[in-house]
Image (cartoon, helix red, strand yellow):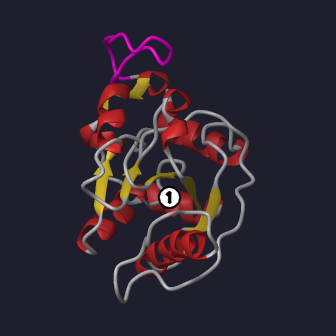
């Protein structure tokens, strides 16, 4: 098992990719799961399937486990969503769920390039439904992702640092000058399935 591993989740459009980029910019190991680990497959068996359906967007479980077991990095953040997260969610010390209001969600989807998932009407309808129901993300620490990106990442690192300083973790989790002691709040979303970022 790696030193500490975290999952950053949320419906499409909540900012998982941007958070991953910012974490990497700050020097943390940040994995773009939807780019580096994802493929089309059966969520239960992992067997590859043809097409590009949302319900078959899964991560390579063996790759996730190998990255999580790499203890050369003090922290690893996995960012993105998958239909088979139940197969590896036990590897994470914490799950962060990015959350935005419906108006912000639609505004962001309006700006999405036409060749990106979530730009088509049917895809947008699915995203809106998943946002309403919360059925497609695991439970976790809810992070207000309507804030500026730097504040979103600060809040995540604050929670990670707080968990360590209060004795929930065994290793320091914030680099000098990053991740001030802060607050996290328990997620309200029910256990479910992840989604593309």
Q: Between residues 154 and 107, which one lies in front from this camera angle?
A: 154
As drawn, 101 above or below 35: below
Q: Quadrant of the N terminus?
A: top left
Q: Is residue 76 left or right of residue 42?
A: left
Residue drawn at x 68%, y 38% as measured from the top left: 191
Please tell me whether residue 181 belongs to the stretch shown in magenta. no
Q: Position of residue 108 (x, y in %)?
A: 46, 61
Relative placement, left or right, of 64 versus 6 is left
Q: Residue at x 62, y 69 (%)?
A: 167
Q: Nearer the viewer, residue 128 or 186?
A: 186
- Rendered image quadrant of residue 193: top right
Number of numbered labels in the structure image: 1
Query: Where residue 43 sits in the image (x, y, percent)?
Result: 48, 19
The magenta-colored residue range is 39-52
Q: Picture coordinates of residue 3 (x, y %)?
A: 39, 55
Q: Which residue is mark 1?
A: 14
| Residue 51 painted magenta | yes
Query: Between 146 and 150, which is closer to the camera in this rendering?
Result: 150
Secondary structure type for disc 1: loop
* 10 Å crowding of disc 1: few (<14), some (14-19), many (20+): many
């Amino acid at each position: 098992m790696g030193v500490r591993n975290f999952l950053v989740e949320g419906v499409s459009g909540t900012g998982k990719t941007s958070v991953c980029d910012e974490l990497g910019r700050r020097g943390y190991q940040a994995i773009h799961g939807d780019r580096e680990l994802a493929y089309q497959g059966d969520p239960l068996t992992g067997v590859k399937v043809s097409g590009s359906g949302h319900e078959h967007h899964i991560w390579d479980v063996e790759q996730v486990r190998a990255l999580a077991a790499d203890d050369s990095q003090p922290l690893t953040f996995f960012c993105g969503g998958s239909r088979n997260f139940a197969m590896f969610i036990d590897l994470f010390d914490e799950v962060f769920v990015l959350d935005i209001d419906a108006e912000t969600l639609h505004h962001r989807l309006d700006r999405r390039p036409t060749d990106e998932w979530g730009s088509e009407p049917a895809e947008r309808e699915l995203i809106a439904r998943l946002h309403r129901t919360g059925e497609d993300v695991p439970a976790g620490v809810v992070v207000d992702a309507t804030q500026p990106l730097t504040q979103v990442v600060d809040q995540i690192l604050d929670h990670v640092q707080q968990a360590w300083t209060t004795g929930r973790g065994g290793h320091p989790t914030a680099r000098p000058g990053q991740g001030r002691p802060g607050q996290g709040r328990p997620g309200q979303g029910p256990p479910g399935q992840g989604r593309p970022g």
